[in-house]
Image (spheres, rainbow, N blue to C red):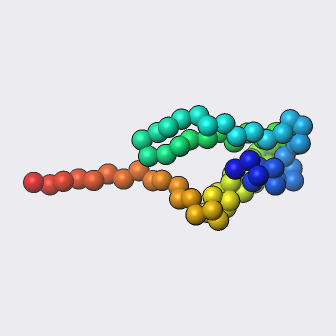
Amino acid sequence: MLAAANSVDTALEDPAPAVVFVDMAASSLNFNVTAWAPNDDFFPMMQEVRRACYNSLNQAGIDIPFDQLVIHQA
């Protein structure tokens, strides 16, 4: 994820992007990916960072968990 964030051209190098492990959830490990950009570029840059992280995880064969509900009927 850090390499993906660093690959986004509009993300600032100083301060550099950062990835922090924040939580062990029921079916996932949760991370915060933070990057910085000038105000006008921030939201488009974060969209690019999210897309780059998603693509990077897919290429690595890492699936994103989705909640599942199992109902047993007697």
Where on the picture, by quarter, is residue 40?
Answer: top right
Q: How many marks?
A: 0
Residue 59, position as x, y percentages in the image: 65, 65
User: Along the horizontal axis of the image, is 23 left or right of 4?
Assistant: left
User: Along the horizontal axis of the image, is 46 left or right of 72?
Assistant: right
Residue 4, position as x, y percentages in the image: 75, 54
Is residue 74 among what the camera can see?
yes
Q: Which residue is drawn at 84% across and 46% down?
A: 11
Is residue 38 among what the camera can see?
no
User: Along the horizontal axis of the image, is 33 left or right of 9?
Assistant: left
Residue 1, position as x, y percentages in the image: 70, 50
Seen as rendered, the residue at the extreme left is 74
In the foreground, 39 or 33: 33
Q: Which residue is drawn at 81% across and 50% down?
A: 6
Residue 9, position as x, y percentages in the image: 87, 53
Quadrant placement of the C terminus? bottom left
Q: Residue at x 70, y 40 (%)?
A: 19
User: Along the horizontal axis of the image, is 25 left or right of 45?
Assistant: left
In the foreground, 31 or 41: 31
In the foreground, 29 or 48: 29
